[in-house]
C-alpha cells in the first residue's frame, strides 16, 4: 500500500492511537490529523499529530467535517471505544439516521455504517495494520516460562473454542483449564472474561487464556490487542498462560509485558 501524504486518525482509548501516530510518521506519513473522543482518548496524542479535534462519541458529522476540512482522503480507526459509551451515545442527526437504518445494531454494523458515511464524503477507512506489523508477533513468540505438555494441550483446545465463538460473533477470548471451558468472552469484554475465568479456576489458579481474531475479521474497525494491563489482570486472576493469535494480535508495551510475565510467572505466547 502506498504511504499517504496525509492520514486521518479516529482515535479511541488506551495506547494504540499514539503508537499508530509514531509508526505512521516513521513510515513517511507527513501529516497526521486526529479526531479524538472526549472521555476516551489519551490527551498525549496531541503531541504526536499535526492537528487534533475533540468530539463526543456520536458526533459523526463533526468527525467527517473535520477530515474534509483538512483534506483527508484516507483514515484509520484505532483504539477502543468503551462498549457502554458506544451504545449510550448521543448521536447527532447524521449518526441518528445511520443507526435508524441498521437492521442489527452491534459494534461491527455501527462501524461499518460509519465507514459507509465516510465514503460518501470521499474518505476511505483503511486498515492500520500496515503501520503496526512490528507490534504483531509471529508464531513461536514466547515470554515467561516454557509451556508444559498439559498447557500446550489446553492451548490447542482453547484455540479451537475461541475460533468457534469468534466465528459466531460471541467474543474472541476463552479461559480453559484441564480441557474444560471456564469462561467465554461476551459483551463484558476481555478483561472481565479473564477475571471470571480466574475465579472459576479455583484457589490454585493455573488456567489458560486464548484470544483470537474472527475468521473474517475486519481489521479496519478492530485489532485484537493485549498489553501490560492485560498481564496485570492475568496475574490478579492467577492465570498461567496468555496465548494469542500470531500475526493478527497487537502486543502493546512489550517491555512492560515481558517484565510482568517473568515477575508473575505467566507464559505469553503467539499461536
Image (cartoon, rainbow, N blue to C red):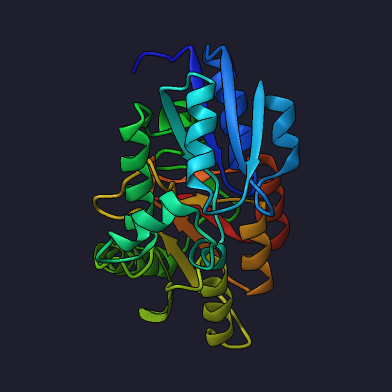
Give the residue drawn at x 54%, y 61%. Answer: 90
The image shows residue 115 at horizontal and vertical percentages of 35, 41
Q: Is residue 172 left or right of residue 55?
A: left
Give the residue drawn at x 35%, y 41%. Answer: 117
Q: Please, is residue 251 above or below residue 164 in the view?
A: above
Front residue of 55 and 179:
55
Occupied quadrant, residue 122: top left
How many labels sit on residues?
0
Front residue of 90 and 87:
90
Give the residue drawn at x 41%, y 22%. Answer: 73
Quadrant of the frame with the N terminus: top left
Q: Is residue 199 left or right of residue 114?
A: right
Residue 53 visible in the picture: yes
The image shows residue 177 at horizontal and vertical percentages of 44, 78
Residue 212 visible in the picture: no
The image shows residue 130 at horizontal and vertical percentages of 41, 27
Give the residue drawn at x 47%, y 25%. Answer: 68
Q: Please, is residue 16 above or below residue 80 in the view?
A: above
Q: Please, is residue 122 above or below residue 160 in the view?
A: above
Front residue of 219 and 34:
34
The extreme front residue here reads: 93
The image shows residue 149 at horizontal and vertical percentages of 40, 65
Front residue of 12 and 225:
12
Occupied quadrant, residue 254: top right
Amino acid at each position: 500500500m502506498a504511504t499517504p501524504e496525509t492520514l486521518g486518525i479516529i482515535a479511541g482509548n488506551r495506547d494504540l492511537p499514539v503508537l499508530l501516530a509514531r509508526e505512521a510518521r516513521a513510515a513517511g506519513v507527513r501529516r497526521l490529523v486526529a479526531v479524538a473522543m472526549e472521555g476516551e482518548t489519551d490527551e498525549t496524542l496531541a503531541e504526536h499529530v499535526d492537528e487534533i479535534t475533540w468530539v463526543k462519541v456520536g458526533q459523526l458529522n463533526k468527525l467527517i467535517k473535520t477530515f474534509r476540512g483538512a483534506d483527508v482522503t484516507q483514515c484509520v480507526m484505532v483504539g477502543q471505544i468503551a462498549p457502554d459509551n458506544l451504545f449510550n451515545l448521543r448521536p447527532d442527526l447524521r449518526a441518528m439516521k445511520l443507526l435508524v437504518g441498521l437492521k442489527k445494531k452491534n459494534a461491527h454494523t455501527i462501524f461499518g455504517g460509519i465507514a459507509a458515511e465516510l465514503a460518501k464524503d470521499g474518505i476511505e477507512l483503511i486498515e492500520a495494520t500496515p503501520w503496526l506489523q512490528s507490534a504483531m508477533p509471529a508464531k513461536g513468540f514466547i515470554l515467561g516460562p516454557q509451556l508444559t505438555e498439559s498447557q500446550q494441550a489446553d492451548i490447542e483446545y482453547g484455540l479451537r473454542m475461541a475460533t468457534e465463538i469468534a466465528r459466531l460473533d460471541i467474543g474472541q477470548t476463552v479461559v480453559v483449564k484441564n480441557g474444560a471451558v471456564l469462561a467465554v468472552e461476551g459483551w463484558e469484554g476481555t478483561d472481565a472474561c479473564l477475571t471470571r475465568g480466574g475465579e472459576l479456576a479455583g484457589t490454585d489458579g493455573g488456567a489458560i487464556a486464548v484470544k483470537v481474531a474472527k475468521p473474517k475479521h475486519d481489521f479496519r474497525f478492530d485489532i485484537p490487542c493485549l498489553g501490560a494491563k492485560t498481564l496485570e489482570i492475568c496475574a490478579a486472576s492467577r492465570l498461567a498462560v496468555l496465548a494469542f493469535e500470531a500475526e493478527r494480535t497487537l502486543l502493546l508495551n512489550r517491555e512492560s509485558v515481558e517484565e510482568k510475565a517473568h515477575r508473575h510467572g505467566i507464559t505469553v505466547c503467539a499461536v
